[in-house]
Image (cartoon, rainbow, N blue to C red):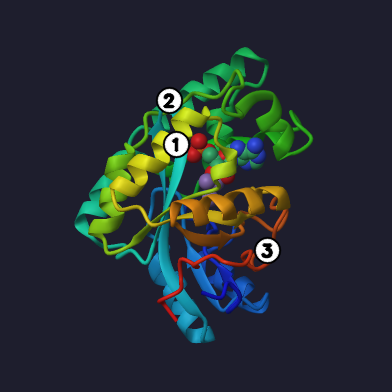
């Protein structure tokens, strides 16, 4: 299977979750950047998919409805992307509703931890950055903390306060891997492990993740993503080949001002991989 082909970007976020652009504006930006196959994958929510699909159709760009589900695996947050999902499927919708349910309480707790470190009012400050309060998360806090002058940029916020192992992060109990893959398959989609290079799992925990993911019917991993270095493209390409997994590509674009990689800004997949979109075009 050839790895070259259409320009694809199968991972990004709109203002429905923690991106800053509306779904229709993301569609326009992707199209303007030459993307031919585009997916919107908001965190734990499918409410932006209709608008995105409509705009993509108007532009003549192929659209893949997606979602990025927060999962807890061995106490670590792992993200599972669903591609080609029916966003209205009752099992997926109900599952995502439950995943979102704990976010406000967790956000209040992060606000308290930030207050203890001399940054009061962060919960109230972060709220207006979340279009949907149900989806309030660390990115919204980071935007507030930068705007309020507590940190120079988003990276500094995660480095000092809100990164996974930093003092103001409050870990959540997200979906289980079994649930997330189950909902994606029920909704007719393909499950993909997002940015595998980002997880702080031991090799044993990571192998167990892959084993269970494949057992459950998971299909692929992201090889080329805005979160990987070129060296990691090669590492995860080799993993996909060895494990017989499909390969995906996505910028994980959140904002023109914050994201290192723009929509459509990634190189093509390395050779000798089967793209996750191989039978969609
Ligand atoms: P949450 O779902 O509230 O745990 O927030 C996770 C989100 O925070 C991710 O989807 C990213 O958008 C953002 N994020 C996590 N770590 C970093 C980081 N080191 N730098 C920038 N953004 C990050
Ligand atoms: Mn995000
Ligand atoms: Mn992610
Ligand atoms: Mn993402």
Q: Is residue 73 left or right of residue 267?
A: left
Question: Residue beneath label 2, please?
Answer: 75
* In this view, 259 is above or below 34: above
Residue at image position (56%, 75%) is 2
Q: Position of residue 147 (x, y in %)?
A: 71, 39
Which mark is first along the chain, 2 or 3?
A: 2
Label 1 and label 3: CA atoms lie apart by 27 Å
In what element is the residue under mark 1? Answer: helix
* In this view, 223 is above or below 196: below
Q: Does mark 2's beta carbon lie closer than 8 Å to ligand 1? A: no
The one nearer the camera, 77 or 243, is: 243
> How many numbered circles does the render carry?
3
Q: Residues within 10 Å of mark 2 (few under 14, many from 20)?
A: few
Question: Residue beneath label 1, please?
Answer: 207
Q: Position of residue 65 (x, y in %)?
A: 40, 67
- Asked where in the image residue 160 lies, by quadrant, the reply is top right
């Amino acid at each position: 299977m050839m790895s070259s082909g259409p320009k694809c970007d199968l991972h990004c976020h709109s203002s429905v979750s923690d991106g800053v652009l509306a779904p229709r504006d993301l569609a326009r930006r992707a199209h303007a950047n030459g993307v031919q196959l585009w997916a919107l994958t908001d965190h734990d929510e499918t409410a932006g998919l209709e608008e995105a699909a409509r705009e993509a159709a108007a532009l003549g760009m192929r659209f893949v409805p997606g979602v990025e589900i927060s999962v807890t695996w061995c106490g670590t947050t792992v993200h599972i992307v669903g591609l080609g999902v029916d966003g209205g499927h009752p099992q997926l919708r109900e599952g995502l509703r439950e995943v979102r349910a704990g976010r406000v309480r967790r956000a209040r707790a992060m606000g308290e931890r930030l207050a203890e470190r001399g940054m009061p009012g962060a919960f109230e400050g972060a709220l207006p950055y979340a279009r949907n309060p149900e989806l309030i998360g660390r990115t919204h806090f980071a935007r507030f903390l930068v705007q309020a002058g507590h940190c120079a940029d988003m990276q500094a916020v995660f480095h000092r306060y809100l990164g996974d192992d930093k003092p103001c992060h409050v870990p959540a109990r997200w979906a289980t891997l079994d649930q997330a893959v189950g909902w994606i398959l029920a909704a007719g989609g393909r499950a993909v492990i997002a940015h595998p290079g980002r997880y702080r799992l031991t090799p044993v925990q990571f192998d167990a993740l892959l084993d269970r993911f494949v057992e459950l019917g998971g299909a692929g991993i992201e090889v080329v993503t805005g979160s990987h270095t070129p060296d990691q493209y090669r590492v995860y390409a080799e993993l996909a080949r060895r494990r017989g997994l499909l390969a995906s590509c996505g910028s994980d674009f959140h904002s023109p001002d914050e994201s290192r990689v723009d929509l459509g800004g990634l190189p093509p997949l390395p050779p000798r991989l089967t793209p996750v979109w191989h039978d969609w075009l």
